[in-house]
Image: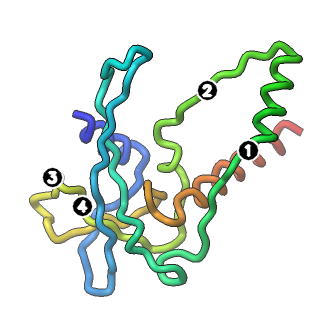
Amino acid sequence: MAMHEELNLFKRNEVWDLVPNRASHKSIGTKWVFREKLDESGIIVRNKARLVAKGCNQEEGIDYVETYAPVARLEAIRLLLAFACIMDFRLFQMDVKSVFLNGYIEEEVYVDQPPKFMDYEHPNHVYKLKKAMYSLKQTVNKCFNSKFKTCNRLHKSCN
């Protein structure tokens, strides 16, 4: 069930296209990562599945140019919390389910079909990624850049 939800999310976000595998394409493997979501009392609420690329097989300069890791400094978080307390703001934590599946990638990246979900009509085909996927080296960079561009467009349209 959880794996089907994840694959439907990929389909809805138009993350990839199924294409014939050529010898010139070096495809990256995929694997499923499973996790149990717990409530406050530690009871399992639901099972989660995430399809990730085996990004450790990527080579710098060939498969990607640069990586990026956004990090919030502790001082910035403390400042935000202090400001929220002083101004009596309510803060909410938000978990975006498919944030990484929204960043377009320019590189040609091919991944293997998901384990246990092979297309029986095209078993030798691979997926060509149109958008970033979990565990690729360039995923965070592409996601951040696409969100930053969207925020800039929104800001310019308001002025």
Q: Amino acid at mark 3?
A: Lys
State the residue at coordinates (19%, 56%).
115
Q: Which residue is mark 2?
A: 93
Q: State the image coordinates of residue 106 (x, y, percent, origin top left).
A: 54, 69
State the residue at coordinates (50%, 66%).
137
Q: Amino acid at mark 1?
A: Cys
With respect to residue 74, does 148 lie above or below?
Answer: below
Q: Which residue is mark 3?
A: 116
- For mark 3, does the 10 Å Cα neighbourhood hold few (<14), some (14 to 19), or many (20 or more) residues? few
Q: Which residue is mark 4?
A: 113
Mark 3–mark 2 Cα distance, whole angstroms, equals 34 Å
Mark 2–mark 4 Cα distance, whole angstroms, equals 34 Å
In the image: residue 99, left or right of residue 116: right
The colour style of the image is rainbow
Label drawn at residue 21: none
State the residue at coordinates (81%, 41%).
75
Element on which disc 1 rests: helix
**In the orientation shown, which residue stands out farthest toward the left?**
120
Labels 1, 3: front one: 3
In the image: residue 131, left or right of residue 117: right
- Placement of the N terminus among the 4 image quadrants: top left
- For mark 2, does the 10 Å Cα neighbourhood hold few (<14), some (14 to 19), or many (20 or more) residues? few
Circles 1 and 2, Cβ within 8 Å, touching? The answer is: no
**Which comes before the other along the chain, label 1 or label 2?**
2
With respect to residue 19, does 98 lie above or below?
Answer: above
Q: State the image coordinates of residue 21 (x, y, percent, origin top left).
A: 24, 76
**Which comes before the other along the chain, label 1 or label 3?**
3
Label drawn at residue 151: 1
Circles 2 and 4, Cβ within 8 Å, touching? The answer is: no
- Placement of the C terminus among the 4 image quadrants: top right
Q: State the image coordinates of residue 86 (x, y, percent, origin top left).
A: 88, 17
Mark 1–mark 3 Cα distance, whole angstroms, equals 38 Å
